[in-house]
Amino acid sequence: MSPRSPGNSAARAFDYIVVGAGSAGCAVASRLSEDENLTVLVLEAGGWDERPEIHRTDAAAVLALLTSEWSPEIDWGYATEPEPALDGRRIPVARGKVAGGCSSVNALMWVRGSRYDYDRWAALGNPGWSYEDVLPYFRRSEDYTGRAAASRGSGGPVRVRDLDDPTPLAEAFVAGAAELGYTAPEQDYNGERQDGFGFLYQTTRDDAGARSSAADGYLRPALKRPNLTVQVRARATRLILDGTRVTGVEYERDGQLHRAVAEQEVVVSAGAFESPKLLMLSGIGPAAHLRSHGIDCVQNLPGVGGNLQDHLFVPVCYQSLQEHPEGALLSEAGLFTHTKDAGPGDPPDLQFTFGPIKFLAPDAPAAHQQGPGFTFAPISLLPQSRGRLRLRSADPSANAVVRANYLASSADTDVLVHGILLARELAHTSAFGPFRGAELGPGERVTDPRELRGYVAAHATTLWHPVGTCRMGSGPDAVTDAELRVHGVEGLRVADASVMPTIVAGNTNAPSVMIGEKAAGLIQKSFLQPSLRTEGNHHAHV
């Protein structure tokens, strides 16, 4: 039986409206509704996470989530415009359109990023976002079932577990990394130092491998609270403004437009694509661009939709000489390392994930598709390339135009080429000897640097980690301040991966949940101190 969805709430007012029940939005709504004196409305464009496939976590199930005929039910269907540095390919970028957002459709890896990531955010003019500042929110979000550590959380909404029964191939990856001289992090890669190798932590609830999503951990337990209202299949179409103050949200549900009033604030947690799109549809964004679509500009914020960053990876795939289980997860083991000499405290710029499956292009030869295999996935962690998102039209039902600008910086290609070479070193360790068959991609004959760069251009693709399109900070391109309040607009915050000034060195689900936790804390603080709701939020763009 699906959770209740109340009837038309258009005539009702709420203290807070949260747009988007994704990784961050679920955390915001759950934490705010803990105060029985506050009323909270959540608007989620997708439905509940009812499909049983969502809750399976094996590799085949995770891949099927976004490649099946029913995938449009849970995915926004985004793809980039043709990418010049990727041979003109349009790159599909999955975005969860379902309760839990991307935490309901991702590969279940729990990676916080490095200390450097958050200290850099603070140094960029965002007080309160250093590693020490955000660590309590990471801990609060977690229910880690492994060995106790000071940096780990227990009893939180998201269950985080050690990998159960790694496959022999995952064990070979760990042994191979050790053979090459890499070390394991002193505690774990979510601790003080990220560098090194190990098995990946998984967001699963139990030994059976059921997914632990933000919907499962935050939203479902909160449904019993009478002060929380959740509307699914409710797509926000624009923010309602009185001058430069947001007073509510217009949304479409069942083919009809509704309005909900926010007595205190609206929190936009719709993700790195839909959050800037909603702001622009509401007249908040680059003035000339808005006017070109017939939208009156309420607040000229040139940075809305800019600063787009994402993680690219390139698959290095091998035939396996032995049959083997596909494993409990899409990726079971990983490595964080550097492509060049790094100073103390510098973050890794290259991540590896590894899975006992074949990851081949759709047009790969049929012979390559046959039999077992395994894939190294080197990832460019700290890309220098920046893209942007713009409206396709003033129609809220039209997906935005995404120009990711992947590999515009040649340095990003350098990282991936380095990753291919390191993958080959790993594959040729003695640990992989019993398993290593032919190299299917790029192919062992591809050794010339120009050919390797060509392979990257032809085969690199996204890890589905877009961030940064409503960057927090100061300066003309910032969208929010460090309290996540939109510059020059009252009653509006953004809380999701779009506020990241720079992408983190790792998967983005855990940081997105942390942002939701911290956003709730900031709102609760401002509720106790009303003057904080508008202080520092007069960032003029004319």
Image (cartoon, helix red, strand yellow):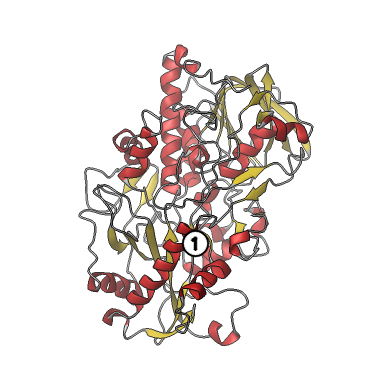
Q: Nearer the viewer, residue 249 or 314?
A: 314
- Above or below 368: residue 204: above
Q: Which residue is situated farthest in the top direction here?
A: 531
Q: In this view, does 346 lie to the left or right of 49?
A: left
- Above or below 309: residue 337: below
Q: Which of 255 and 451 is in front in this view?
A: 451
The residue tagged 1 is 56
Residue 204 at what x, y percent from top left?
Answer: 40, 55
Q: Can residue 456 be seen in this view?
A: yes
Residue 84 at what x, y percent from top left?
Answer: 63, 60
Residue at x 40%, y 30% (from the top left corner): 126
For the C terminus, the quadrant is top right
Q: Is residue 107 visible?
A: no
Q: In this view, does 386 lie to the left or right of 74?
A: left
- Above or below 225: residue 192: below
Q: Which of 246 and 80 is in front in this view?
A: 80
Residue 247 at what x, y percent from top left?
Answer: 64, 20
Residue at x 49%, y 81% (from the top left corner): 440
User: In which quadrant of the rendered view does residue 130 lie?
Assistant: top left
Residue at x 58%, y 34% (from the top left corner): 303
Q: For the image shown, how many numbered marks are present on the structure?
A: 1
**Could you classify mark 1 by the number of other residues whose Cα lies within 10 Å: few (under 14), some (14-19), or many (20 or more)?**
some
- Above or below 471: residue 206: below
Q: Is residue 346 left or right of residue 389?
A: left
User: What residue type is disc 1 on?
Assistant: Arg
Residue 30 at what x, y percent from top left?
Answer: 47, 34
Task: Determine whether the residue tagged by mark 1 lies in a helix, strand or loop.
Answer: loop
Residue at x 36%, y 47% (from the top left corner): 112
